[in-house]
Amino acid sequence: MNQSRRDALRIATVLGLAITAGILKPTDVFAADWKSGGFDAKSLQEALKSLGASGAQISTDVAVNGPDIAENGAVVPVSVTSKAAKTEFMAILVEKNPNPLSASFVIPGGTEPTISTRVKMGGTSNVHALVKADGKWLIASKEIKVTLGGCGG
Amino acid sequence: MGNPMRIRASASGDVVEVKVLMRHDMETGQRKDPSGAVVPAHFIQTLVAKCNDKLVLDSLMGTSISKDPFLSFKFKGGAKGDKVTITWTDNTGDSRTDEAVVS
């Protein structure tokens, strides 16, 4: 009696582990993909390096649009636009955030290189738009002043 | 399963403008609750948009995207009646897919 109970426990444990492993697997894969994108970088240089964009050049073909002064750092509307031909990748970086990289976008052919979203800003900072067009990295910046921080609480 | 998204896709000519409003906490993992305990990170990591099974946007997001993320983009080659499908996945493995018809 006691033995069969032990067996049942053992089987349940193994099954539980297997299920957990099964559930965790896809998450791990996403996390790896996400980490390789430079999201855990702590500084702008680090983020650019992990994206392979250390030599990004300042370009007037790229633009960051947003308010000059954001009252609430938790919700800052930002849009990035590229006029460069063959834009294949865009990213939004907030220089002084704990993790500067906010979002990255792969732009397939046919999609216009203009994206708007809303980001959190810990304080007044330069916001950078990073673009990869025709194999070249281009960058443009805009300073957005924040009167109330959006990170931490 | 997360909360439903609001998706609006409108065509002008052959350009379709998509606006998405997701419902998600987007916790950074750096905020503390009133008792001083760190609120664990919970945020959307990937977002994929398709129009009739053709990829139109593939995106990765970090913790510094605002709560209830908003995203707007445009793509060519869409027409009224096409189906726009958007899927996000967050760091806990949760995901949500919603679709809208281009109007």
Image (cartoon, coloured by chain):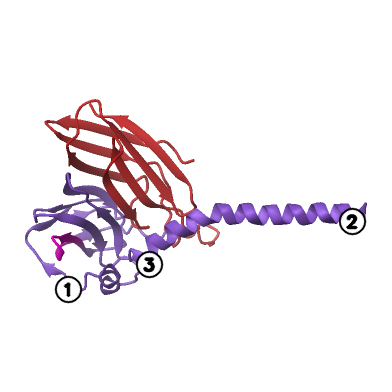
**Range shown magenta:** A128-142
Residue A68 seen anywhere in this rendered image of the structure: no
Quadrant location of residue A145?
Answer: bottom left
Q: Residue at x 74, y 52 (%)?
A: A12
- Amino acid on which disc 3 is placed: Asp
| Residue A91 seen in the figure | yes
The local crowd at label 3, few if under 14, some if 14 to 19, many if 20 or more residues have their Cα within 10 Å, is some
* Quarter assignment of residue B76: top left
Question: Which element type, helix, strand or loop, lies under badge 2?
Answer: helix
Extreme left residue here? A60
Q: Residue at x 43, y 41 (%)?
A: B96
* Left or right, B87 with reference to A117: right
Label of residue A40 in the image: 3
Query: Where's residue A50, x and y in %?
Result: 30, 70
Which comes sooner in the sequence, label 3 or label 2?
2
Q: Report, in whole angstroms, how far the alpha carbon at label 3 lies from the one at label 1.
A: 20 Å
Q: Colour of chain A?
A: purple
Instruction: Give the residue number, with chain letter if any, for mark 1.
Output: A55
